[in-house]
Amino acid sequence: MEEKKKAIIYSRFSPRRNEDECESIEMQFDFCRKWCEENNVEIVAEFADRALSGADEDRPELWAAIAALERNYVLVVYRLDRLARSVYLSDIIERAIQRKKATLISVCGEGTWGFTDEDWLVRKILQTLAEYERKVIGARTKAAMLRHQANGRLMGSIPRYGFMLDPKDKRKVLKSQYEQVVINQIKRLNKKGLSLRQIAAELANLKYKPRKVLRKFKGKPVYVKGKWNPQTIRLILKRLSPE
């Protein structure tokens, strides 16, 4: 009598602004469980990562799911992009599954229900499209943030360098005259060809004060005097870049 196949189910949920349109972990599990039931596959364990990117290698539950695989087991996912949105990462994951002598199944098919060259090609095309979609989403999100910043909206917990909280509305920001002067100095020094370290040293020589830094002292948050450093200069210049 043929031994009943066993499955490990994995799901990933990364909430966005249109969260109601995203596939929840519960919904992914429901589809995966239904597939296992219809194909007479026994579910051994279920793993889920919440609010993590498909391009992120640091997903404890994903690697725990792969570690739990044994020979002839099946790793079941709702869609391939729940596993990875990077061709490079998806390749690493597939190799890890193969080393376990296990197989990968996407409930939506996506070239995982067979082992032909055509199936392999379908998987790679879909993984490439998922990676491209992730980059488009990232570019669209960045453009929206820049648009909101240009309209004076606070993005994040503190204003980016060159701006300050609007005293009349803490949800908005205004240009900081002092920091705008410093930014112009940084641009001038950068245009002269000075290195990041040299720019930081020159700002200190010119007595320009950096922002204070939040630290903990005896368990309490305290703002202390900051220092100009190459990392800070790099971040300011990066935010000035149109890219």
Image (spheres, rainbow, N blue to C red):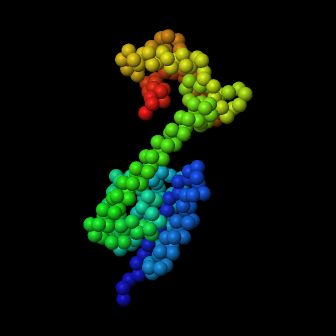
Report the residue at 49% width, 78% height from top: 37
| Residue at the right extreme of this rendering | 168
In this view of the protein, can residue 189 be seen by the observer? yes
Q: Relative to 17, does residue 207 appear above or below in the rendering?
A: above
| Residue at the left extreme of this rendering | 117
In this view of the protein, can residue 235 be seen by the observer? no
* Quadrant of the rendered image containing residue 100: bottom left
Q: Relative to 207, does residue 218 appear above or below in the rendering?
A: below
Report the residue at 39% width, 54% height from top: 129
Q: Relative to 141, does residue 185 appear above or below in the rendering?
A: above
Where residue 213 appears, x then y in whole percent?
A: 57, 27
Decide if residue 29 is on the left or right side of residue 108: right
Where residue 134 appears, x then y in whole percent?
A: 44, 49
Decide if residue 99 is on the left or right side of residue 217: left
Where residue 97 appears, x then y in whole percent?
A: 35, 64
- Along the line of sight, which residue is nearer the eye, 106 or 103? 106
Report the residue at 44% width, 51% height from top: 133
Quadrant that contains the C terminus? top left
Where residue 2 appears, x then y in whole percent?
A: 36, 85
- Along the line of sight, which residue is nearer the eye, 242 or 236? 242
Quadrant that contains the N terminus? bottom left
- Along the line of sight, which residue is nearer the eye, 125 or 88? 125
* Quadrant of the rendered image containing residue 218: top right
Report the residue at 63% width, 25% height from top: 174
| Residue at the bottom extreme of this rendering | 1
